Image (tube, helix red, strand yellow):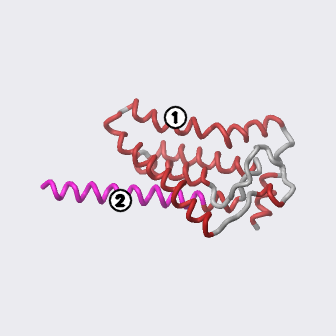
Amino acid sequence: MDFYFFQLINQFAGKNIYLDSLAIFFAEYFNYLVIFSLFLFLFVNFKKYFKMVIKALFAAIFARFVIVEIIRYFFPKPRPFVHNHINLLLNKTNELSFPSGHAAFFFALATVVYFYNKRIGILFFISAFLISVSRVFAGVHWPSDILVGAISGIISGWLVNKIFKKVRKNTLLENN
């Protein structure tokens, strides 16, 4: 099933230079614009969004470097190009593929932003989706890598939001 969905997406890679360029942009470079956009919140209203930015970064880093690495340790899975002849658009190392660290990172950011601002949060979710799907298109991830990475990121964002709320609530109770 994973290979079937992978082929549905990856079959178009290498066929059109404009589509390939767009996929490479979203897979490799668009993430910098998303992170830059997160920091723009600080310029808009530092006081209002500082905690959001900290939570978002904490959730994203936790998702990518804790949750993803634990899953990779117990469920090692090679990238699609290792044992298959596929359309590969990016030069990648032969590191483990499952789950996607990019998906986990950017879906965690999107989740935290969504808790603060629904409309902009949806834009962050769309960005996370575009980054993730383009990595399948480019041949460096399986669809299941993206799905589990996205779930890991969303759980991380939700969990960090809950923990920060609980800590804030307990701090307010202690100060009274």
Residue found farthest to the top: 43
Q: Is residue 173 magenta?
A: yes
Q: Quadrant of residue 64?
A: bottom right
Distance of mark 1 from mark 2, alpha carbons? Answer: 25 Å
| Residue drawn at the location 45% of the way across and 33% of the way down | 40
Q: What range is drawn magenta here?
A: 149-176
Q: Is residue 110 above or below residue 49?
A: below
Q: Which residue is mark 1?
A: 36
| Residue drawn at the location 35% of the way across and 59% of the way down | 163
Q: Is residue 117 found left or right of 32 in the rendered image?
A: left
x and y, in percent, of residue 152 in the image: 54, 60
Q: Amino acid at mark 1?
A: Phe
The secondary structure that dominates the magenta segment is: helix
x and y, in percent, of residue 56 in the image: 44, 47
Q: Is residue 125 above or below residue 35?
A: below
x and y, in percent, of residue 140 in the image: 73, 51
